[in-house]
Image (cartoon, rainbow, N blue to C red):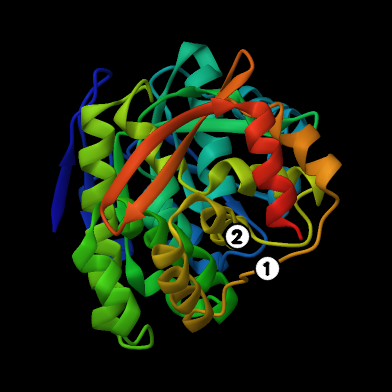
Amino acid sequence: MIIPVKTSQGNYDIVFGRGGLNSAHEHMRLDRRVLIVTDSGVPGEYSEKIASFCKTPVIHTIPQGEASKTLDTFKELLEVLVKSSFTRSDCVVAVGGGVVGDLSGFVASAFMRGIDFYNIPTTFLSQVDSSVGGKTAVDFMGIKNIVGAFYPPKCVIVDPDTLSTLPSRQISNGVAESIKMAATSDRELFEFLETCDINDPRSTDFIIERSLLIKKNVVEEDEKESGLRRVLNFGHTLAHAIESVSEFSELYHGECVALGMLPMCTSEVRARLINILKKFNLPTSFEANADSLIEAASHDKKLSGDKITLVYVNSPADFEFKKIPFSEYEILLREAVK
């Protein structure tokens, strides 16, 4: 399946289907120098497969985890490009999860003011969310994604077969983002998540496909997050605060999003959300220092002056943007950790 995405910086295709990794060269121009960025948790055969299609491949592996998403690693990759004599006509390919994709895309956006970038997401979370939309970034001073750029890829290859090597916790971590999108934008997907069997490949494919279509439609309508695209932040304000407080070490991103959704919906939606989260072994409660969470949230990109814009879900596929004083949000944060 080809899902076209239109952006002001150029259009690109999401190529979705099992076995897509084996035919990736049909959708990417690899007859040049290619920096393939992967991490230590991704099976080596994935990057080796892409390398086999390239004229001059350079594989660079970074340590797995959010701790690699820094300006130090950004510099490290730029040094690889320079030392390997890359030019403006060469490209970068990300093979991995959201950290690899965000980091590689940012490097591609900056090297020689921008070279071609391709994304091959290999985790559930990156396949349904972070690989689409052109957001690239690194973390800085403990603040997630605060330094980055909008830089769309030339193509995204989404192959659900690459999920077969993931532990179940990583699958659940990604499903949290699909739950987020279903809650705000797709009642049918929300109801499907309540009843489906995630162990059935047909369920996996349906969830990924519907999530990609939601992300595509939102991104095309609001590329730079000035309006509708903010709906994708449902659950993320609290999630980013939890990540910052824990220094990205205790909970996965999707697990933090799961927690972040619960204070931002009606009691009816919350009850249904809790059932779905439990079904997918996602957390529904946590312990944290409220003052630390508030301090972390005060750096959120959605904060404007003394007010913050939040996504609130009234019923599945029925949401609203609420702009409230940050002092009111502090109360919500304190209640969330009780």
Mark 1 touching mark 2, by CB under 8 A? yes
In the rendered structure, which amino acid carries the disc numbered 2?
Leu
Q: Amino acid at mark 1?
A: Ser
From the viewer's side, name the closer residue of 211 and 158.
211
Q: Which residue is mark 1?
A: 285
Disc count in the image?
A: 2
What's the distance in space between the residues labelled 1 and 2, CA to CA?
Answer: 7 Å
Q: Position of residue 312 (x, y in %)?
A: 42, 45
Q: Nearer the viewer, residue 331 or 304?
A: 331
Q: Quadrant of the N terminus?
A: bottom left
Q: Residue at x 36, y 20 (%)?
A: 226
The residue carrying mark 2 is 259
From the viewer's perspective, is residue 194 above or below residue 262? below
* Residue located at (56% from left, 54% from top): 263
Describe residue 246's horizontal placement relative to residue 40 as left or right: right
Q: Residues within 10 Å of mark 1 (few under 14, many from 20)?
A: few
